Amino acid sequence: MYKIVKRDQIADNIFEFWINAPHVTKTGRAGQFVVLRIDENGERIPLTISATKGDDVRIVFMATGKTTQQLAAMQVGESIRDVAGPLGKPSDVKKWGRCAVIGGGVGIACLPILARELREAGNDVTGIIGARNEGLLLLEDELRDACDELVICTDDGSKGHHGYPADVLKEMVSDQILDAVWIIGPAIMMKITSLATFDSGIKTFVSLNPIMVDGTGMCGSCRVTIAGEMKFACVDGPEFDAHEVDWDELMNRQRTYTGQEKESLEHYHE
Ligand code: FES
């Protein structure tokens, strides 16, 4: 059992939980994830490691489905049945030179740990974060601290650049000042944003979020196609070269259980 040691709502419907899980924090690195199960009969949910401190790991999630709403209702002192991890491969952190880390929506929560590791490896890091509006921006102060500079974008112009992280990335690409880019957010955002680096060939990583069940390479539910080859996101990723991803297949597969998820949420609220 893994105790919730801190819990906050940090934006509209977005929650930050710190969970005591020493086996995760001992080796957990940027890019890796955990799979949570609230109770014995619970659904498994994969969540990227957002930060670690001592024996505690931070996860950040939007309460959109039945399980994430159940999780959001839990309080400090309560325990989660399973926290499996760290799973997946860590981000390719090395001395690249000038890096940009880009987050959209709840994906922003994955950036602080990555930005810190990249800076520790001697890189210069620009953070670019985007959300629909100011109320959905996350961890701004923490990212300002973790990055050399931070650029904020909102779709409605309520804060920072009025537009998308892709606009800022395009400018950086044309100024020829980038060596590597990470993009983490909804699939459509990662697909569109990564087009900005396609022609230049700048190494661009994305963290894929297909449906996952076991998270250990056994069930095959997380299969994705990368450079024409089948890979399992949970063990071969979740980070892959953005320019090699079959985005249409990923987005189609993400929609597989939309009906069942809606039904399960309706039952939960009955
Ligand atoms: Fe089952 Fe990846 S989640 S193989």
Image: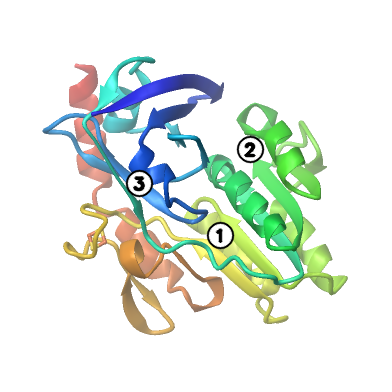
Residue reaching furthest to the bottom? 228
SS label for mark 2: loop
| Mark 2 crowd level (few <14, some 14–19, many ≥20, 10 Å Cα) | some
* Three-letter amino acid code at the position of disc 3: Val
Cα–Cα span, label 2 and label 1 = 15 Å
Using the image as rendered, state which of residue 88 and residue 196 is in the foreground. Answer: 88
Percent coordinates x, y for residue 75 in the rendering = 36, 15
| Residue located beneath label 1 in the image | 190
| Mark 1 crowd level (few <14, some 14–19, many ≥20, 10 Å Cα) | many
| Residue located beneath label 3 in the image | 34
User: Image check: 41 left or right of 111?
Assistant: left
Residue reaching furthest to the left? 41
- Which corner quadrant of the image does residue 178 belong to? bottom right
User: Image check: 174 left or right of 225?
Assistant: right
| Residue located beneath label 2 in the image | 132
* Three-letter amino acid code at the position of disc 1: Met
Which of the image's four quarters has the C terminus?
Answer: top left
SS label for mark 1: helix
